Image: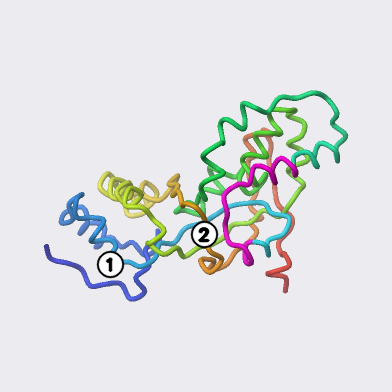
Amino acid sequence: MSDLKLPHNKTFSKYSLSWKELHFIKKNVKKHEFVCWFRARYDFIICYHGCCPKDVAQYYQNGFLPSDFPKTMQAFQGLLTEVGYHFPYDISDVLKIYQGKTNRFVYVILDEEDFIDQASHYIIYGSETMLSLAQNVSPSLKSYLRNIGIPTVFHLKIPLGKITDGELLNLYEQIRCSNGTMEQRRFQIFSNYTIIIEPSLDADCIVGHYHPTDLLYDQHAKQQYQNKTTFCSICAP
């Protein structure tokens, strides 16, 4: 099999994928060859992580960790106390849904635009577990979550050693099935694409971060939302 010249920085991303390379993969790289071909060609893949932390600096210190159920429950109890909620509730179903998922994995995506167009709840509410707990107990609790933390998108450069072969095979299928213009193909390949990392990501994967101020549609509250906080302790001018 002939090959393309290696990219200079050996980093794969939505913006580095060229028309020439896309067609080369579709025409010359078979599914059973793709993982080895990809790993020989690239060392890193660009991904993004959206959240709404009170303290952005914790990610630069500790990296990205799976949800800690005891800490999440402690934070949720603190929220209930803060808003004066004293009614009985049952959250066992919520914990069953997330057990073995969010408390084992870190989730990243390939297209940062998804946090604006499709999955804004990650940067509006932060923890998906916390959001589910709030919705399960009382929908009114969501309005309090919207005002906690700073909407943040992290730009990550992840070593391919953290990515499983299965994830790369899924990427191959996205590439193989793409069609249309280059812009359309990039959307088909990268949009709504989640990569699961186990068990954590080190802080040295962080390239940078920003706090989106786009006007978002909050699907959970059925209304618009706009972040007004543009700086944190890390990026303050």
Figure quadrant of residue 95: top right
Specify the color scheme: rainbow
Q: Residue 135: x percent and y percent?
A: 69, 30
Figure quadrant of residue 220: top right
Q: In which quarter of the image is the C terminus?
A: bottom right
Q: Give the range drawn in magenta.
A: 59-75
Q: Residue 166: x percent and y percent?
A: 33, 48
Residue farthest to the right, as pictured: 84
Q: Name the residue under label 1.
A: 41
Residue farthest to the left, as pictured: 1
Q: How many marks?
A: 2
User: Label 1 is placed on what type of residue?
Assistant: Arg
> Circles 2 and 1: CB distance less than 8 Å?
no
Q: Residue at horizontal 41%, vertical 64%?
A: 159
As drawn, the label of residue 201 is: 2
Q: Is residue 203 left or right of residue 8?
A: right
- Under circle 2, the secondary element is loop
As drawn, the label of residue 105 is: none
Q: Residue at horizontal 71%, vertical 61%?
A: 230
6 above or below 79? below
213 above or below 82? below
Q: Is residue 139 left or right of residue 94?
A: right
Q: Residue 215: x percent and y percent?
A: 65, 48
Q: Residue at horizontal 20%, vertical 68%?
A: 4
**Mark in the foreground, 2 or 1:** 2
User: Label 2 is placed on what type of residue?
Assistant: Leu
Q: Is residue 64 magenta?
A: yes
Along the line of sight, the residue nearer the viewer: 136 or 152: 136
Q: Residue at horizontal 75%, vertical 28%?
A: 138
Q: Residue 16: x percent and y percent?
A: 37, 65
Q: How far apart are marks 2 and 1 (CA)?
A: 22 Å
